[in-house]
Amino acid sequence: MRRFALVFILSALTVGAAAAGPPPLASDAEIDAAERAPLPAIVVSMKWNEPLAPFNVIGNIYYVGTVEVGAYLVTSPKGHILIDGVLPQTAPQIIANIHALGFDIRDVKFLLNSHAHFDHAGGLAGLQRASGAAMVASAGDRATLEAGEIAYGPSAGMHFPPVRVDRVIGDGETVEVGGVTMVAHMTPGHTAGCTSWSLKVADADGAPHTAFIHCSATVAGQSLVPESYPGMVADYRATFARVRKFDADVFLANHAGFFGLEAKRARRLAGDVDAFVDTGALQRFNAALEKAFEKELARQQANAK
């Protein structure tokens, strides 16, 4: 009898520990302090944390980000997927946006990240705390997300609450919930683990579309000569080549200026269900980024001589 009781107690403790899940990497105090911290001047001037009313982009994709920095909620009957956390100070705003749309942050099953810069990953720890969701990220960005700080580029030294990565995802692998499948596309350069995401979506009329949420391939003040990380130049070029082969007619990104959010949002709110449908937008963006990259590389190479 005593042996049975001991086995029962040990089993209960084991189940309780498993239910609690892995420990967070950022404490409540660290997350709370980061959410209350004053905004850097660049954040204010660029409107990175300026509130924007959430809205339906197309099908089951909703915009829950700010005026200039994107975050997306992809919904399903069995739970949701949230892409990007913007800044630490933005997490409460994203949670409120999700609620305003009629959804619950606690129903978010997966958190995804485009790349590990403070303006896109900063709010992830707070969102993980609020949702209990599993964090999914690339191998190339995992260390940065779990350190809460990137080691290179203009964002170096801009700390954010570290977020626990529960699953490392590779190119072509998927995240699935409730019949929704998100496909990961490794598009490094902007960071070593920069990850774009795609999914199939239907508009209000039932027409099928493919959405592509671009990680970014801007240079954005990074050093190409010398490379901020080994292989950066080759990574950028491989990304441009990879995206050239991708066919998507709904192009989204993590900065509003990249895809004309303001004008398309106005059309969508006016009733145009296909306001974000543009078969050539992704390739125009890719071509413009590639041209800008090669120009900046040539400039840095000339200055290094």
Image: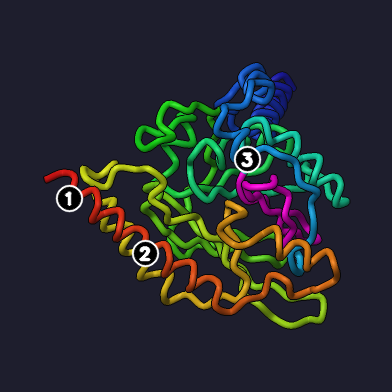
Mark 1 nearby-residue class (10 Å; few <14, some 14–19, many ≥20): few
Mark 3 sits on what residue?
A: 48
What's the residue at 68%, 53% (across, down)? 72
For the residue marked with disc 3, what is the amino acid?
A: Trp
How busy is the neighbourhood of tag 3: few (under 14 within 10 Å), some, or many (20 plus)?
many
Three-letter amino acid code of the residue under disc 1: Ala
Q: Which mark, residue 290? A: 2
Marks 2 and 1 close (CB-CB < 8 Å): no
Task: Choose the circle earlier in sequence order: 1 or 3.
Answer: 3
Marks 2 and 1, the one that precedes in the sequence: 2
- Specify the amino acid type for callout 2: Glu
Element at label 1: helix
243 horizontally vs 269: left or right: left
Q: Is residue 77 left or right of residue 199?
A: right
Closer to the eye: label 1 or 3: 1
Identify the residue at image location x=66%, y=49%: 71
Alpha carbon separation for disc pair 1 and 3: 33 Å
**What is the magenta range?**
61-84
User: Does the image show residue 15?
Assistant: no
* Residue placed most toward the observer, 156 or 78: 156
Q: Residue at x 41, y 34 (%)?
A: 150
Left or right, 96 with respect to 228, comes to: right
